[in-house]
Image: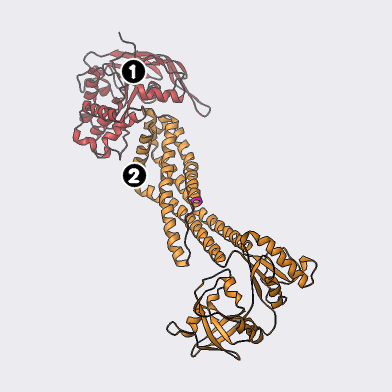
Chain colours: A red, B orange
């Protein structure tokens, strides 16, 4: 078995607000192996966003150990975290977060500006990433604000792929899309997973989570359920059992 | 991040909002242009004043009557009422070793009447030496001779402007007659145009023999100035001292503080005038730099707005792996590029304004290296200082907060 991409042991996160302490994570342990497609599911306030921030190296846990691609990141400083994000994590956001006035190409190339990839190689890698998200080549020179929501999310996924990250972390990637488009994006994730990408997606929608191979449920800062699903690729509308979730 | 990428990203985000970038640049352009224009006009007027003083001759000593006492307050202008210098003083001064020429003159004003035109002009009583000492050339006719002077001859040499005023441009004034009070002066010559030299212009003056002037115009035997030429510029100080000693002894004054004359050195005058012009230029530049400051605040304002507006973009860039330093570098680069572009346009525009304004004022605007260096320095300073705070603010945003920002 390959070394785990994510190895979380007893993660705790405590936010100290004005006098009040919020225990967002109360000891979360799990690991995700290379090539997995996992959904982290939970209602708002469950701590799933906090977990995502830690997994994405945007934040550090208050206590516990977190290894990303074999590297202990719990105690890194801000610069080192930025370096880890740059090389190891590909983010996909609910709101796409593309630069609206920049072309598709420019958006996809952007992460490579921070990793000092040769200009020649950048174009090549961006084109490769865009092809793998099946975005029509005619659109590559369009500004990103001229695209449809589904196209934008494909661009965002291509952007997440260009630095060849160990982990793709998608935060509610279908939240701003209609069902059909959302499904096509989920199919894309499945396909990327089939190609060997490790994908973790954060969602509160059971239908979306159902399309992952594994669902980790978070409730009140703790993992309440962690289950592997057999036929994850088959979308089963109205079949709550497929997601093993009664809904949040 | 590579430097080319930094520049490319910077230009891209600046051109994404052309109107705002343009207006911000405009603020800097106005500031830099006004500073450059002021400095160029200042340098130009200084040069033209220096030129005119030097064209009067930098080896000149001008002696004028002065009220005794209170020396040390620079040169005083209230000299016309004091009567202390005589033609004999001038003759004695001319005998001094380092002095090559002494031109006594007496100054007055009179109404001059030609056939059908008249003019109120400065009437200078001069000797033959005056032309050589002051570097005057006669365009037409001759100059006042020693014989004219000793004979109280009623002859006049007209300045170029005055000749035109009295006779127009078509008539050759030489041989014509000009009336002034009880004098009937025959025009014997017209001077070539000289321009302003020192503080007086001979172009609009009438030159008559000193003896004639003293008898008919000023009515006394005193002089309003004696101009000396010194053998060479290196000897100015020595010559000045010996002239002072001679005059003091001739006027029987023992304490130099009570001298009834003062000697003005053209070099000193040049210094004084330069200082005045320098101060004036600095004042104008200081006023102009206020607009530069306003331009700088404009940059900061725009950058702060940009940081707020692009919060999500900053969050994204950080999530993708840009660390604080790169983010602040990117924002700093934007403000530096804005000031840089504004600075270049400003220098060009300022130079244009100075050239046009100089044309109107009759000054040759001079763009000095110092002025450009100052403008560039100020630009860089503004770009960095006013860009730094917004840049740090952008960099300090937490990526999590920034990504959530709506």
Res B322 label:
none
Q: What is the chain identity of the residue bearing mark 2?
A: B
Q: Quadrant of the N terminus of chain B?
A: top left
Q: Main secondary structure of the magenta part?
A: loop
**Residue B116 percent location from the top left of the image:** 48, 90
Left or right of B370 on screen, residue B345: left
Q: Nearer the viewer, residue B35 or A59?
A: B35
Res A217 label:
1
Res B15 label:
2
Check the image and report above or below for A104 versus B377: above
**Residue B62 percent location from the top left of the image:** 65, 69
**Residue neighbourhood size for the residue with mark 1, other residues' Cα within 10 Å, grouped as few (<14), some (14–19), many (≥20):** many
Q: Which residue does the image show at 24% across and 21% down from the upper left?
A: A192
Q: Quadrant of residue B63?
A: bottom right
Nearer the observer: mark 2 or 1; the answer is: 2
Q: Is label 2 in a helix, a strand or a loop?
A: helix
Check the image and report above or below for B115 versus B6: below
Q: Quadrant of residue A222?
A: top left
Please say whether residue B217 is visible from this viewpoint.
no
Q: Nearer the viewer, residue A206 or A16?
A: A16
Left or right of A135 on screen, residue B245: right
Q: Which residues are magenta?
A: B362-370
Q: Quadrant of the C terminus of chain B?
A: top left
Q: Is label 1 in a helix, a strand or a loop?
A: strand
**Residue A170 percent location from the top left of the image:** 31, 25
Check the image and report above or below for B257 versus A213: below
């Amino acid at each position: 078995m390959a070394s785990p991409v994510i190895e979380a042991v007893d993660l705790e996160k405590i936010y100290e607000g004005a006098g009040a302490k919020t225990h967002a994570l109360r000891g979360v342990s799990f690991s995700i192996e290379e090539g997995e497609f996992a959904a982290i599911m939970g209602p708002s306030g469950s701590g799933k966003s906090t977990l995502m921030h830690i997994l994405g190296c945007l934040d550090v846990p208050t206590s516990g150990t977190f290894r990303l691609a074999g590297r202990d990141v719990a105690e890194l400083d801000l610069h080192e975290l930025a370096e880890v994000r740059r090389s190891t994590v590909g983010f996909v956001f609910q709101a796409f977060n593309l630069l609206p006035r920049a072309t598709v190409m420019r958006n996809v190339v952007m992460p490579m500006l921070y990793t000092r990839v040769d200009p020649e190689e950048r174009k090549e890698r961006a084109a490769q990433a865009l092809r793998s998200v099946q975005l029509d080549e005619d659109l590559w020179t369009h500004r990103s604000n001229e695209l449809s929501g589904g196209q934008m999310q494909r661009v965002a996924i291509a952007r997440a792929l260009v630095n060849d990250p160990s982990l793709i972390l998608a935060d509610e990637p279908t939240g701003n899309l209609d069902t059909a488009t959302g499904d096509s994006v989920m199919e894309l994730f499945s396909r990327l997973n089939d190609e060997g990408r490790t994908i973790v997606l954060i969602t509160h929608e059971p239908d979306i989570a159902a399309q992952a191979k594994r669902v980790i449920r978070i409730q009140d800062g703790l993992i309440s359920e962690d289950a592997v699903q057999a036929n994850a690729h088959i979308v089963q509308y109205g079949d709550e059992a497929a997601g093993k979730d009664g809904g949040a | 991040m590579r430097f080319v990428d930094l520049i490319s990203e910077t230009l891209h985000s600046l051109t994404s909002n052309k109107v705002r970038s343009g207006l911000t640049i405009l603020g800097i352009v106005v500031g830099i242009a006004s500073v450059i224009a002021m400095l160029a006009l200042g340098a130009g007027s200084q040069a033209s004043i220096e030129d005119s003083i030097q064209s009067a001759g930098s080896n000149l000593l001008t002696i004028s009557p002065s009220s005794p006492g209170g020396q040390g307050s620079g040169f005083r202008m209230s000299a016309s009422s004091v009567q202390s210098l005589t033609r004999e003083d001038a003759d004695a001064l001319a005998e001094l070793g380092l002095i090559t020429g002494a031109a006594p003159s007496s100054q007055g004003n009179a109404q001059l009447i030609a056939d059908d035109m008249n003019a109120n002009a400065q009437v200078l009583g001069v000797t033959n030496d005056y032309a050589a000492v002051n570097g005057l050339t006669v365009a037409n006719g001759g100059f006042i001779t020693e014989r004219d002077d000793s004979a109280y001859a009623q002859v006049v040499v007209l300045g170029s402007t005055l000749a035109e005023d009295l006779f127009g441009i078509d008539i050759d004034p030489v041989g014509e007659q000009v009336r002034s009070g009880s004098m009937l002066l025959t025009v014997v010559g017209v001077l070539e145009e000289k321009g302003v030299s020192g503080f007086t212009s001979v172009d609009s003056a009438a030159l008559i023999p000193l003896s004639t002037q003293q008898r008919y115009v000023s009515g006394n035997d005193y002089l309003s100035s004696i101009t000396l030429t010194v053998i060479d510029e290196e000897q100015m100080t020595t010559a000045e001292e010996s002239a002072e000693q001679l005059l003091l002894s001739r006027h029987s004054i023992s304490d130099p503080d009570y001298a009834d004359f003062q000697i003005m050195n053209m070099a000193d005058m040049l210094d004084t005038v330069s200082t005045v012009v320098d101060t004036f230029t600095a004042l104008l530049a200081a006023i102009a730099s206020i607009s530069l400051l306003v331009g700088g605040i404009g940059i900061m304002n725009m950058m702060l707005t940009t940081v707020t507006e692009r919060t999500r973009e900053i969050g994204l860039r950080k999530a993708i792996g840009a660390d604080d330093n790169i983010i602040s570098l990117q924002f700093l680069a934007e403000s530096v590029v804005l000031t840089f572009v504004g600075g270049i346009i400003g220098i060009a525009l300022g130079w244009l304004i100075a050239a046009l304004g100089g044309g109107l004022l009759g000054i040759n605007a001079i763009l000095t290296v110092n002025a450009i260096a100052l403008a560039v320095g100020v630009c860089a300073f503004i770009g960095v200082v006013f860009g730094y705070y917004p840049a740090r603010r952008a960099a300090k945003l937490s990526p999590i907060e920034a990504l959530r920002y709506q």
